[in-house]
Image (cartoon, rainbow, N blue to C red):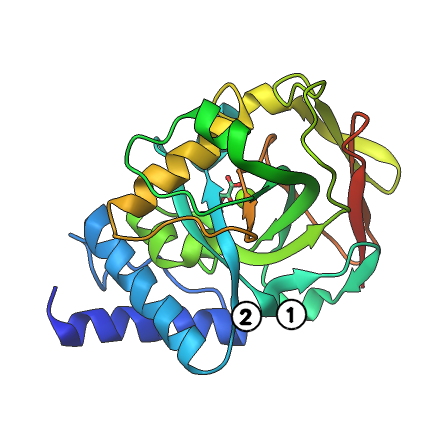
Amino acid sequence: MEREVLQKLVETVREAQDGHIEIEKITKALAPTLTIEQAYEVQRELVRQKVARGEKICGPKMGLTSLAKLKQMNVTDPIYGYIFDTMLVQDGGVIQMKNYIHPKAEPEIGFVMARDMAGPGITKEDILQATACIFPAIEIIDSRYQNFDFTLPDVIADNTSAAGSAFGPSIPLSAGIDLARIGVRLLINGQVAVEGTGAAVMGHPALSVACLANMLAAKGECIKAGQPILTGGITAAVALAPGDVVQAKFDAPLGSAGFRVE
Ligand code: OOG
Ligand code: MG
């Protein structure tokens, strides 16, 4: 991709992200032939610019790892992006609707690795052996595109709609925990909005982490020890409104994470 085109795409997405303004998807008029590979180039430059202005990467995230999400977004493949320190929402804290466009919440299982994981060839077993801890999470996604209407290249360029993350307390991944069987209910104002189990994420969320390590390897990157990693929404995402009290309640011993919308 030409440098000028790349910069124009990055600027378009960055301004929408910074200003919480929705835009037409970039594949509509700006870059109709944008490939997935090129979209990751846009994402990489966007991430570089955010880091250059002082934002810190917390960790990588997977997206579109469950059938519920693939169907809801009408796309076919998992993708990855990055969570920044500026996106963190305190567990039990408050978010302001004005800092988002049309935010949605999705329950996710988080991982922290005890050592760097560099693909290719990383397996689910490699991940399970090297997991330092796991944590309950809610990701707030806020596609910068009108009506959450995008193609895979669009959403990759938009850093996978990442806009907020609330992490609950971490626990060790002890031998007795089967993450495929752990259930979660996303409660909005005490009512179950959506529910699912860990298996919804690629059969087992550890496989999502393995997939991430292998996708990053293709770009010369790896998962770093100690980074929080999100494995992808277990359920479809739920639109938020002011006044909502949002809680993801996982089966024991994973616990819960939540926040309120103002
Ligand atoms: C893309 C982000 C997907 C997930 O967990 O599946 C994602 C979107 O749905 O806007 O973060
Ligand atoms: Mg997500």
Gap in angstroms between the C-alphas marked 1 and 2: 6 Å
Task: Choose between 180 and 39: the one closer to the eye.
Answer: 180
- In the rendered image, the quadrant that contains the N terminus is bottom left
> How many numbered discs sit on the rendered protein?
2
Say which mark, if any, is on residue 99.
1
Residue at the spot 68% in from the left edge and 20% down from the top edge: 175
Task: Choose between 197 and 149: the one closer to the eye.
Answer: 197
Q: Describe residue 83's horizontal placement relative to residue 135 as left or right.
A: left
- In the rendered image, the quadrant that contains the C terminus is bottom right
Q: Position of residue 107 (x, y in %)?
A: 66, 38
Task: Choose between 204 and 175: the one closer to the eye.
Answer: 175
Residue at the spot 53% in from the left edge and 38% down from the top edge: 231
Sequence-first disc among 1 and 2: 2
Q: Tell me the SS state at disc 1.
A: helix
The residue that disc 2 covers is: 20
Q: Position of residue 202 (x, y in %)?
A: 47, 23
Q: Describe residue 51's horizontal placement relative to residue 248 as left or right.
A: left
Task: Choose between 258 and 27: the one closer to the eye.
Answer: 258
Q: Name the amino acid, label 1.
A: Asn
